[in-house]
Amino acid sequence: MQKRVSNIIPPITGHIDRTDIMDRGVRYIGRDSNGADVSVDVYGSRMDVNVGGRTILVEGDYLKYDDSDRKYIICDRKGRVFLNFKVKDDGTFTVKYGREG
């Protein structure tokens, strides 16, 4: 049986300009489709998305963590809230923040 998911906010799209490798993880920096600054930090047990000064943080367990494909999905420890971040080969990205229910 499939679980139903709903977005908490509409998906965020844009373009990644650069990637920084840090000792704790990876930071993707760019702009969203409205021109706001975006940074996405991918760490061992959490992912932060900062868009125009507003931050979304999910701590939990990764369902998918693939540096080569640049796709990351993290779910909180209760298994209800998720953050999905993917960068395509052309540098465009999509962030989805939602919940199962």
Image (spheres, grey):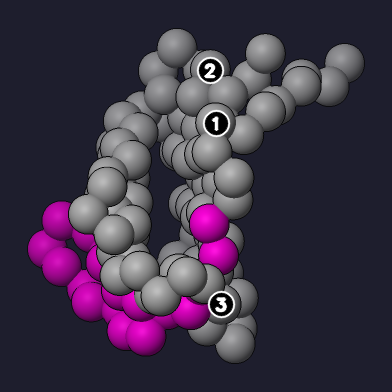
The residue where tag 2 is placed is 80
Asked where in the image residue 51 lies, by quadrant, the reply is bottom left
Which is more toward the observer, 77 or 13? 13
The residue where tag 3 is placed is 92
37 sits left or right of 81 in the view? left
Question: Tag count in the figure?
Answer: 3
Label 3's element?
strand
The amino acid sitting under disc 1 is: Ile
Q: Is residue 54 above or below residue 40?
A: above
Question: How many residues crowd mark 3 within 10 Å: few (<14), some (14–19), many (20+)?
Answer: some
The amino acid sitting under disc 3 is: Thr
For residue 8, the mark is 1
Does residue 68 show up?
Answer: no
Of labels 1 and 2, earlier in sequence is 1
Which circle, 1 or 2, is nearer the viewer? 1
Residue at 64%, 20% (x, y): give it. Answer: 100
Mark pair 1, 3: CA separation: 21 Å
Mark pair 1, 2: CA separation: 12 Å
The amino acid sitting under disc 2 is: Arg
